[in-house]
Amino acid sequence: MQKSCRYKAYSLNNFRDIPQMERLPEEIKFDIEVVGHVLPFKANNFVVDHLIDWDRVPADPLFLLTFPQRDMLLPHHYEEMAALLKGGADRAELKAAANRIRLQLNPHPAGQISHNIPSLDGENLDGMQHKYRETVLFFPSQGQTCHAYCSFCFRWPQFVGLSDLKFASREVDRLIDYLQTNPQVTDVLFTGGDPLIMSARNLAQYIEPLLEADLPNLRRIRIGTKALSYWPYRFLSDNDTEDLLALFRKVGENGKHLALMAHFNHPRELAPEPVRQAIAQIRQAGAIIRTQSPLLRHINDDPALWIQMWNEQVDLGCVPYYMFIARDTGAQHYFNVPLVRAWEIFREAYRQVGGLCRTVRGPSMSANPGKVQVLGTSEVMGEKVLQLRFIQARNPDWVHRPFFARYDEQATWLSDLKPAFGEERFFYQKEFEQDYRENLEEGHPEDYE
């Protein structure tokens, strides 16, 4: 077993204490401070000491992945916050300005508030989301933070103190009630934040009641986590590591499939020996590790990186699962890759890996109607088009029905695309817009795109 490592966290209050910060000019440190007042920032000693190549900073991809950068804010937002900091604004002024900016950054994309919150007996279950028929997302209260924050994260509102933008629930009994009344649900995904920030004891208080409830429809439990990359000692030498691994084994012993939905955004995250040991420990405990990441400009927008990442993941016993498109929230303008280019990167990487790597799906947008995969470009009846399909959808009947958009080299999201062949709408839009109007009548005015 790996020797224990003491955990040290870094935030906006103490990031200048990081020894490697002495190498950086003051203007970069000020940029971190400015952007970190709007978008969340947190790192730890494993990220700082084992993942970031400080000889390549500020261009290092793992530095960009975890430390806020000036261009992650739009210029007018950056200037507003910078002026306040330089002028000695007090905490209340800074918070008010930050919140004004945050509300302009589409803090809850893809209908997370307007469409995804389920209800039971007339009561909204605010710590849950149910978008796709078979899968319910559950947000445990103690899991709404992370070992470190990714600068692209679409769940950034969870971490910035806007309570009305935060999902969290302690009500596992209500989750069980909901599963009992919705037998079509086969999968529960524990998400956050990062559920594996929790102690094994707290995590067990959510998982064990699900096992004891004897729910015949519940077949799979998933845990979304970045802990493998940002704190592998969680599975090696933390005080309750053995209890955590025992909990993993218990899921399998109760006839349920346990999947860790692990986020790896760059092949360097797979290199540290503790990460490799942690993967082995999880697999020995009976869990399957499925890997996913958005495609991110400045960080991994190179087919060679994906080829390396998928090959190494399979060699370590993981299953490549998704390449996503950076969501339309937060710093998307900094990270986005046009859909045409995203497909080119995916195709170039996909065609150069073996069949065991080709479990990966993408590039995929988790948009309001569903997960939309870009299948490629083609020419149909003399018109150049983008071919698309739903991998998942609010209406399961939409899944795997191909549809076409006008070719657009600048489009970065579904809402940028227009139907091909002179059509007014994509095939799903009439039904989806009707659902949106019903939500408007119920008091949800959020934009359905």
Image (cartoon, helix red, strand yellow):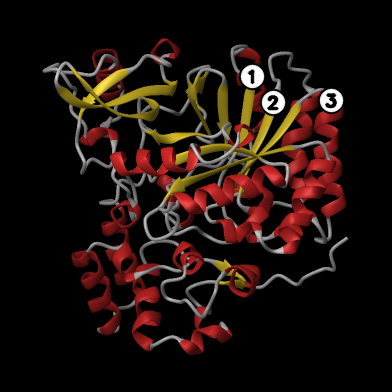
Seen from the viewer's position, the closer of residues 128 and 377 is 377
Q: Which mark is residue 186?
A: 1
Q: Quadrant of residue 270?
A: bottom right
Q: Position of residue 198 (x, y in %)?
A: 70, 51
Quarter placement of the N terminus: bottom right
The residue pinned by badge 2 equals 220
Dot 1 lies on which element? Answer: loop
Q: Position of residue 422 (x, y in %)?
A: 11, 18
Residue contact between numbered discs 2 and 3, judged by CB atoms under 8 Å: no
Dot 2 lies on which element? Answer: strand
Q: Is residue 147 visible?
A: no
The residue pinned by badge 3 equals 254
Seen from the viewer's position, the closer of residues 128 and 334 is 334
Residue contact between numbered discs 1 and 3, judged by CB atoms under 8 Å: no
Quarter placement of the C terminus: top left
Image point (57%, 54%), residue name = 145
Image point (60%, 68%), residue name = 51
Q: Position of residue 385 (x, y in %)?
A: 22, 26
Dot 3 lies on which element? Answer: loop
- In the image: residue 203, left or right of residue 420: right
Q: Which mark is residue 195?
A: none
